[in-house]
Amino acid sequence: MVEAAHPSSPNSEPRSAMNLLLVGCSHHQTPLAVRERLAFNEAQTVAALSAMRHCWPQTEAVLLSTCNRVELYLGGEKETLPSAEEAGAFLAQFHGLPHNLIQPYLYVYEDEEAVRHLFAVASSLDSMVLGEAQILGQVKDAYQLSAAQGAAGPIFHATFQTAVKAARRVATETTLHQRRVSIPSVAVADFAQQVFDRFDDKQVLVIGAGEMAEETLKYLQDQGARQITVVNRSAERAEELARRWQGRAATWEELVEAAASADVIISTTGAQQPILTAERFAQVTAQRRRWPVFILDLAVPRDVEPTVGDQPGVYLFSIDDLKAVCDANRRQRDAELPLAMRIVEEEAAQFMADLHHKASAPLIIQLRQGWQKPKEEELQRLFNKLPQLDDHARAEIRQAFDRLVNKLLHLPLDTLRNHARQGVPHSLMDALAKLFRLKE
Amino acid sequence: MSRMGIICFAASYGIALLLEVSRLWFRSRLRGVVILGCTAAGLIAHTLFLGYRAFTVTGSPLSSEMDWCLLAAWVLVALYLMLLFAYPRTPFGLVLLPLALGLIGAAGWWASREPYPQAPASRVWGLIHAGAILAATVAVLVAFAAGVIYLFQAYRLKQRRGPLGGFWVPSLEWLDRMNSRSLGAAVVALAVGLFAGVMLNWINYQQHVPPLPWSDPLVMTTLAMFWWLLVALVLAVWYRPADEVRKVAFITIISFIFLLTALAALLLMNTSHGRNRNPWQEQSGQAPQVSVEPYVWQESSLRGGICLWGPAGHGRSRPPFVAQLRT
């Protein structure tokens, strides 16, 4: 654990020349064995943020820890910001790991690169499964936790707000998030939900105990499925699975009856021959009163004879059908990636320009105030010379002077804003300061 | 005024339809807003047009074939607008807007026809009849839309096709529910409309106006559609084999064809529905020089479209003509 040092709050106005630093590791280069040792749960995150505030009191910090990444975002003035090595050492030290164990896996991004990376992460462009929806929630949670601890201030407030905005733009302007690429998610979202509107009143029958069935069932339960029946050749195994999935177990002999009352059938046995043959399904059909029926055959070799899918009211999907859709979705996602990246680039560039422009804000305020004084003096002199002016005429003259000042200032301020797109406009700011004798 | 007004809101719906079609080819952030704007603007113009006709031209809504069609189209577009808010990614407009435009086109066809003849005694039944038939028509059109989308969705799923990029098609269950409810609503509304029509015929019979015969093409197609829908509803409720939903979808499509036939009967065939019919002559069996005086609309009065049909063949003595008949 890092020792506490100087408690202080970073919640103050953003100052000039703000710097951002990101140190972290992700699924791209870091093995799971290292990632899991570096991961932070909520309590650890709170403790780490508290320790960082003591170590680097003038620095804002957000710690993002998910299954696929651990990233420490730091922001503040250059002089007070810790170095990348110090930040990396902090992460290692917090978990009691030798620094050289994690050092090879850490990546470091600064300023605009850090912003661009955060925006890409929030938009799920850096995720293991491109376009997965959870990461945006995790980014928001990380920021909110940090803000609640007083570790995130104005810099990260603006940065994470814009990251969320960029992620929303990616979600609405591309189809990245609509294209699912895992077989269970495609099975439920792209097919089951095209057949059924709701699942809380549907009977789900699981035949076998494959891992894929469990994942599919999780998706169905997320959609509200509650009535689950498990059929397995082993009655004990069926009981065990039914208990785990909060369903009921049925014997192998009850398969036809269970299938007749099911709306969704998921089959994942290891049988070498089809279980639901056309003949057996004819028995099911004879007993059925509920239509349509959605059948997911996730077994290899197949559990359901393909001719069953030709029957009216039966929507049968094999693992190959689902895989074909997954592949098509993946290709379409890849095709959408350049557009998503362009959105992230735009948002990052705009954010950095705003940030750089903020650096010149104190100078602009001084400049405006400096011009107000001679304006007021000249107005006063004019009003003294022309005492016959009524209030209306005075107001008109005052307005004309204000417009003149604004017009004279417009060009230099506009130039300053344009230069802020390339970085903090130090040379222009120096020139302005010298020309108008402003304090930098 | 009529033509310009109709073209104005029909063009708005046409643009919305073209934008709905464009979903098939490209994505756009603005499209949804423009569709919403065009449809809403068209609906406002449509409402103003109906209001203008009701208060200045015909005296009430549903008082001519033209108004009846325009009101049915208005209901369809209003429904589409609600669905657009609830399901922005589902292109209901691809089916509903052509139906609305078809009704507007039929209204344009009928623009030169005279309003229905009105009689104060039958105005309540006339309103019930016209309103119920209008509701039944809209319900059949909605059921048709749900049926077409159902068949499209079922076909896609049978072909194991993944979701479409530009838009989301509702689930089979949702479409089935929409189809069945619309079918039920159509049967009830049609039953009410037919009953009100029979009552109107009976009132006319009391007033010595010849009833609309059962053999009238419009009456025959409407009755056939009613029985067809009733059978479909009974099938859907009591008997549900595997392919029943698809069959119900087909049934609603055939019901739509019945509806088109009924409209064609009004448009092209020799129907006396909604037209002036001379009252019977007292003794000689020949029609006297009498006519039903068109009811003059007054601000305080209500008027409705009148459908006249009832049992054919009346030969018994009849009460004296009422005051509104003139020789």
Image: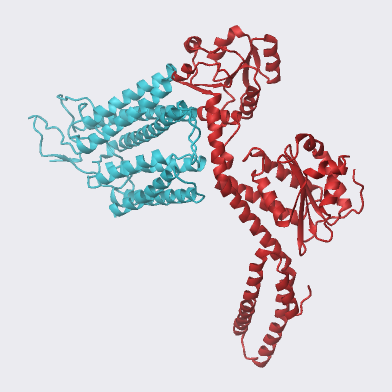
Residue situated in front as seen by the camera: B80 or A367: A367
Q: Is residue A232 above or below residue A427?
A: above
Q: Quadrant of residue A12?
A: bottom right
Q: Is residue B91 found left or right of B7 in the rendered image?
A: right
- Residue at the image point whose x is 61% and y is 25% from the top: A225
Chain B colour is: cyan
Q: Position of residue B163 (x, y in %)?
A: 50, 35
Q: Quadrant of residue A96?
A: top right
Q: Position of residue A193 (x, y in %)?
A: 54, 30
- Residue at the image point whose x is 50% and y is 18% from the top: A290
Q: Is residue A161 above or below residue B258?
A: below
Residue situated in front as seen by the camera: B176 or B219: B176
The colour scheme used here is by chain
Outermost residue, top side: A253
Outermost residue, bottom side: A385
Q: Is residue A165 above or below residue A410?
A: above
**Figure quadrant of the N terminus of chain A:** top right
Asked if residue B94 shows in the view, the reply is yes
Q: Position of residue A311 (x, y in %)?
A: 44, 18
Q: Is residue B160 found left or right of A44 in the rendered image?
A: left
Q: Is residue B99 found left or right of A292 in the rendered image?
A: left
Asked if residue B302 shows in the view, the reply is no
Q: Is residue A63 above or below residue B187?
A: below
Chain A colour is: red
